[in-house]
Image (cartoon, rainbow, N blue to C red):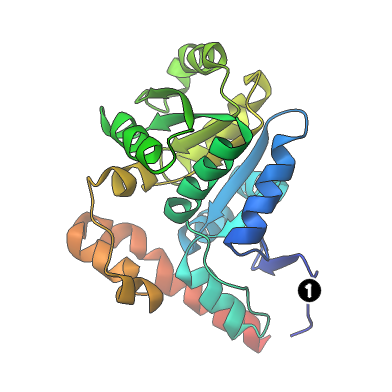
Amino acid sequence: MDKQSPGKLRLLSVRVDRVDYSRALDAIHRLLKSEGCKQVVTLNPEYVMRAEQSGRLLRIINAAELSVPDGIGIVWASRILGDPLPDRVTGTGLLPRICGLCAGTGHSIFLLGGEPGVAAAAATELQSRHPALRVAGVSSADPDPATDDRTVEEINRSGADVLAVAYGCPKQDLWIDRNRDRLEDVRVAIGVGGAFDFISGQIPRAPRLMRKAGMEWLFRLWLEPQRARRMAALPRFAWRVLRTRGS
């Protein structure tokens, strides 16, 4: 397989950026200095397979200002294709780092999504780690387009610079895409999946050794057996990647 762009990799039809946590954070810092709301996608194999079936989601991912390799399957696929990405950059790992950046630069953050009370609990934990962090607001408003006007108004009133959206794939990315032009002060909007649950302690993270071995997905499946249907995307993704390598 020929090497692709030094800054980007294409897996099937989906783009992912060649970043580790440090480079992703540097990119987000630059985005905070620009005009307009920029979208950050946390990519995993489920996204890739959904994008294969949805032209809209494919467009959103490939047009995002930053697409980070969240799932271990993305890193695995890059290695199989002989063009390895540096490492995983998970939403759960990136969000606290973004909050540290905001604490240092004076930017504020709004947490949107999750079950009632979870975003607030995550905000409390993030502020305990970064006492200078300004949390502009939290909301558990649902992703139904019928509620968009009210949610956007609340975010705009808050004056938040960064928006973290925890609706899961693909709802969080669809929400950001359809509302980003109406977010007046937000400079970076990122989908973070289950990050609020993990940061708040609602759901325990896998042991460090399992995470380092790329087996966090198995731990989550044990905790949440209902995820089995979603994880069915993994073998289909693997098969497509292996076929691509052989073509």
Q: In the figure, is residue 186 to the left or right of 96?
A: right
Q: Amino acid at mark 1?
A: Gln
Q: In the figure, is residue 181 to the left or right of 93?
A: right
Q: Quadrant of the N terminus?
A: bottom right
Residue topped by disc 1: 4
Q: Is residue 115 visible?
A: no
Above or below: residue 90 compared with residue 158? below
Q: Is residue 213 visible?
A: yes
Q: Residue at x 66, y 45 (%)?
A: 28
Label 1: element kind:
loop
Residue 176 position, x and y percent, is 57, 33
Above or below: residue 92 compared with residue 141? below
Q: Residue at x 47, y 36 (%)?
A: 165
Which image quadrant is residue 67 in?
bottom right
Residue 180 position, x and y percent, is 63, 27
Q: Quadrant of the C terminus?
A: bottom right
Pick whichever, 120 or 220, lies toward us.
120
Q: Residue at x 24, y 47 (%)?
A: 201
Which image quadrant is residue 208 in?
bottom left
Above or below: residue 114 compared with residue 76? above
Q: In the figure, is residue 45 to the left or right of 107?
A: left
Above or below: residue 50 compared with residue 218? above
Q: In the figure, is residue 232 to the left or right of 188?
A: left
Residue 79 position, x and y percent, is 59, 82
